[in-house]
Amino acid sequence: MRCCGASERKEKKKSRSEESEEDDGMQVALDLLAPRDLKAGEKQCGGQGNIDRLIGAVASNAILNAGGRGDEVRCYPGTREEVVGKIEKWMDGQGEPCHRMMWLSGPAGAGKSAITQTVAERCKKHGIHTANFFFFRGDWTRNHAQPLVATLVYQLRGYYHTLDELLAECLMATPLICEASIDEQFTQLISSPIHMVQQSPSIQRPIILIIDGLDECEDKKKEQQILGALRTLIQEDDSPFIVLVASRAEPHLVMSFNKLGTLVGPIFLNNKYTPRDDIHHFVTSKSDEIKGAHHLAHTLDSCWPAETDLDAITDKSSASPALSLLRVHEMQQSTGSSPFPQLDAVYFYIFSKADDIQTIKLIIGAHFIIQNTTRRDNDFHQLLQLVGYKTIDIHSLFADLAPIAQVISGPPIQLVFYHASLSDYLRDKSRSGIYHINVEELAPGLSTICLQKFHNEWSFILTDKALELVKEANTELSKSLLDASTQNFSRSFKHFAQYEHYWEILIVIIARLYFTRDKALFKRMLQA
């Protein structure tokens, strides 16, 4: 083995040092030759990675005409033209006053999503810069607020070729921006970069943001935060954004929109916008399609469907184009399957949000009963007095049912169902399940309340109607009937001209309930 001397080691060390210097010199030369290309490539690679992270946060099903959406709906040709036209005029700045936000609301099934989708498609057709997000409770990818901003930004990228670079810088500086608060996401990913790319007058254009189904976001606080962020967005100096939001008129959303004041222009889908004409046109047109395309069309009579049937479907659908669609679906099916599961799911969900469902069922059940009496404008008001509820109590009770029912303060106070089908749903146990309203089951309890408080002719009429539905009296009802027959009845009605008539009615009811079951009690009641 040959050992190196000190001089040899020094010479070898020097040789290695020289080699290192040569390598360093070569690297410097390479950097001088093409520094820009190398650095640009590194930046491009990192930037694309950040953009990929942004794309990963997108809810693709929430975008207009996305392949994964199973709820795509649009206005049937020739329908909802008045509402769509009003929204388009607002977008063009023709509305007075010029609101920066439009709130499209209405009952469940009123056609809000169909209108927003139609508006979004027309914007796309006419080259208007727009981004949209369709919330949907049944799709876990778009029933929460987290993907909202990323999904909107993803669509805006298609209008500005320099936007990706700004977004990449933001994502590099703040890697967790997609998990930040809604307000911060709107500021960092939408407001700031859009203002920068629109600095050139040649590309300054309005941008329409369309948010559909805000009430289907799973968190009420997030819904309010979204509205707060949108408010900040449209109030900024030289903001290019205007916003269309569609949702049900949930109480917490009504409060949030009210706080926005004159920034918002509301459209509520009620009878003002002639839904009956649109529904009749839709049902008639679809009937013609069925006659021409259905495989059993040859079995249909030449005059099918009768105009009276079309009118019946139209009236039953009332303010709900969604229900008319289900009716048409029912006509198209040859299997006999129910057309109602989607509608029933909506009803079920809304009732599940009510705080005091038992009291609500009692009030609605009593409402069903008085519908069988000679109606007067103040019937519902007197009913509430009889069962011991004030107007403010009823407003609070029915607040969570706002998408399907409304308490009108009046005077007189009224309970109004937006959909004629709601009564059918509540009366059919196979459809409504735990929310089924069986007036016969409610009758004993309601009768007991009425017997304890009736004080005039009308209140006795309601008491009578409730008692007629009782199949078998329970202990509480028996006690109330005994008290009424021996004391309250005489006190309340002896000064009425038809006292004898009312007393005869009460005797008939008492006889039906007790003559064969409890003759002793029956005799005691007749001793009045």
Image (spheres, rainbow, N blue to C red):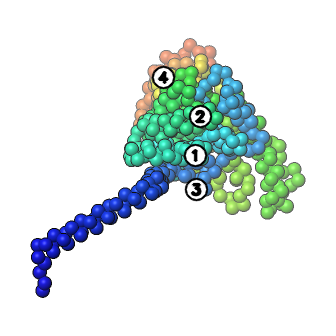
Compare residues 385 and 208 and report the one nearer the observer: 208
Secondary structure of the residue carrying tag 2 is loop
Q: Who comes first in sequence, dot 1 or dot 3?
A: 3
Which is closer to the viewer, label 4 or label 1? 1
Instruction: Pick whichever, 158 or 451, lies toward us.
Output: 158
Image x and y of residue 510, in percent: 52, 33
The label nearer to you, 1 versus 3, is: 1
- Whether pointer 4 and pointer 1 mark residues with C-beta atoms closer than 8 Å, the reply is no
Distance between the Cα atoms at labels 3 and 4?
44 Å
Residues at marks 4 and 2, CA–CA distance in whole angstroms? 55 Å
Name the mark nearer the viewer: 4 or 2: 2
The secondary structure type at the circle numbered 4 is helix
- Residue 161, disc: 1
What kind of residue is marked 1? Answer: His
Give the class, few, some or many, for how many residues have Cα within 10 Å of label 1's Cα (few <14, many ≥20). Answer: few
Of 466 and 362, nearer the camera is 362
x and y percentages locating residue 284 in the rendered image = 80, 45
Between 176 and 211, which is closer to the camera in this rendering?
176
Q: CA distance from mark 2 to mark 3?
A: 37 Å
Query: Which residue is drawn at the image coordinates 50% and 38% (left, top)?
Result: 193
Residues at marks 4 and 2 touching, judged by CB atoms closer than 8 Å: no
